[in-house]
Amino acid sequence: MSTTLQAPVARGDAKRTRTSAACDAPTPERQVRLLGLDIPEDVAPAAHYGLVTAHGGLLYLSGQLPRVGGRVAVTGRVGEDVRMEQARHAARLCTLRALGALRQTLGSLDHVERVLKLQVFVQCTQDFTRHSEVADAASELLAQVFGSVGLAARTAVGVYQLPQDASVELDLVVAGSTPSQPKKEQHAQHL
């Protein structure tokens, strides 16, 4: 069973219907502008793999590190040399890169139908147990951009090491399509 949260409609405004309230709702791209988010436009794989694999209307994003300008911005082990605020910042940077990859693939974040799965990996000490708090930064950003369809099933785990000593890595699975292509054609182009 799937549940979707919906924003309530103001009761005192008789002229405002549920339909008009939905039309007034900000799109993901409008939300990005309102929030002043700086989504990278040049997201590319760092090695020999695909950035996004599309199949049957689903998009599987490769792991994103907290890169800024080609370098990993937050490195080290959370609970040792990386504080919680830094780890949460790293999760936001990873999420911004994932949004950039989605925008590159779909042409617009408005074509994301639903964020289905978020996995967050935290390079941390053996006794660090606050992985969910780090992952919350990514979940919060996705919800700010996409609203209720950004609330995904989630896994947050601690790991011993991540590529390039990154403190955080995340990946996403989303449902989405471009309006100009039927899903079958989109699938064929990305294989």
Image: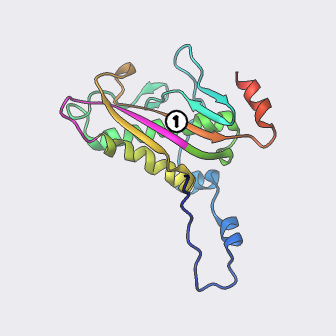
1 relative to 83, above or below: below
Name which quarter of the figure residue 5 lies in: bottom right
Given the current orientation, which residue lies at the most extreme top position? Answer: 48
Seen in the image, is 191 located left or right of residue 114? Answer: right
Given the current orientation, which residue lies at the most extreme front position? Answer: 1
- Mark 1 sits on what residue? 172
Q: Residue at x 40, y 38 (%)?
A: 155
The front one of 1 and 97 is: 1
In magenta segment, residue 20? no
Callout 1: 10 Å neighbours few (<14), some, many (20+)? Answer: many
- Highlighted range, magenta: 116-130
Q: Position of residue 171 (x, y in %)?
A: 49, 32
Q: Residue at x 49, y 46 (%)?
A: 152
- The amino acid sitting under disc 1 is Leu
Label 1's element? strand
114 relative to 17, above or below: above
Q: Position of residue 187 (x, y in %)?
A: 73, 29
Q: In the rendered image, which quarter contains the C terminus? A: top right
Name which quarter of the figure residue 124 lies in: top left
Residue 41 seen: no
7 relative to 108, above or below: below
Given the current orientation, which residue lies at the most extreme left position? Answer: 127
Q: Residue at x 67, y 41 (%)?
A: 176
Seen in the image, is 15 located left or right of residue 99? Answer: right
Q: Residue at x 55, y 52 (%)?
A: 1
The front one of 36 and 106 is: 106
Name which quarter of the figure residue 51 lies in: top right
